[in-house]
Image: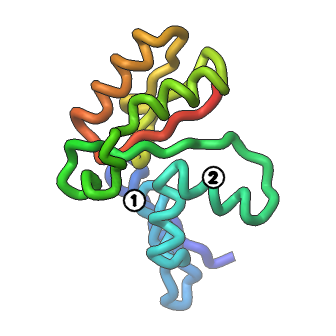
Amino acid sequence: NGLTFTSASHDWIIQLGDGKGRVCNVFGYTFDVNPAAAVDICREKAATSSVLDMHSVPNISHHVYLNPAHEMTCDYVPRKGSWTSIQKLVEEVNFPIVLKPLKGTGGLDVFKATCEREVEAAVQHIFAREYGIAISPY
């Protein structure tokens, strides 16, 4: 069929060729056939959920909370903060819930919380490292 397949970096980088000089690169989850905005949307869990909702595709809803201490997001956090809103969401959704950074892959810093103490610990842990958090039902 004339197709070529080359991989590097433990298959994290893949090049697919058609034998006629055209090559498609795959870097992790990023295909060079996707525009940059589509890639960014796919990397951010809540943005992906919003786009899926716009097209009536079933998905798990994600609620976004921005880090009040992060220089990039602090101006977008209400002066009263987000903690009361997070607590209200937890009451509405009920336990268990999932808390995770807005961006990232591989399950890093993803927490399943079964009580308010675990929610608070997860929020503090994620906000110590990230600009935002996504909260969803389990």
**33 vs 62: above or below:** below
* Measured Cα–Cα span from mark 2 to mark 1: 27 Å
Image quarter in which the C terminus is found: top right
Between marks 2 and 1 in the image, the one whose residue lies nearer the viewer? 2
Direction from residue 25 to residue 137 in the image, left or right: right
Residue drawn at the location 79% of the way across and 55% of the way down: 57
Image quadrant where residue 137 sits: top right
Q: Residue furthest bottom?
A: 20
- Mark linked to residue 25: none
Residue drawn at the location 54% of the way across and 75% of the way down: 34
- Mark linked to residue 49: 2
Image quadrant where residue 89 sits: top right
Residue drawn at the location 62% of the way across and 78% of the way down: 2
Residue drawn at the location 37% of the way across and 22% of the way down: 122
Percent x, y of residue 98: 54, 26
Callout 1 crowding tier (Cα within 10 Å): few <14, some 14–19, many ≥20: some
Residue under numbered circle 1: 13
Mark nearer the N terminus (2 vs 1): 1
**69 vs 128: above or below:** below
Q: Mark 1 and mark 2 in contact (Cβ < 8 Å)?
A: no
**61 vs 26: above or below:** above
Image quarter in which the N terminus is found: bottom right
Direction from residue 71 to residue 61 in the image, left or right: right
Determine the secondary structure under disc 2.
helix
Nearer to us in this view, 70 or 8: 70
Q: Amino acid at mark 2?
A: Ser
**44 vs 108: above or below:** below
Percent x, y of residue 101: 40, 40
Nearer to us in this view, 21 or 52: 52
Direction from residue 60 to residue 39 in the image, left or right: left
Percent x, y of residue 8: 35, 56
Q: Amino acid at mark 1?
A: Ile
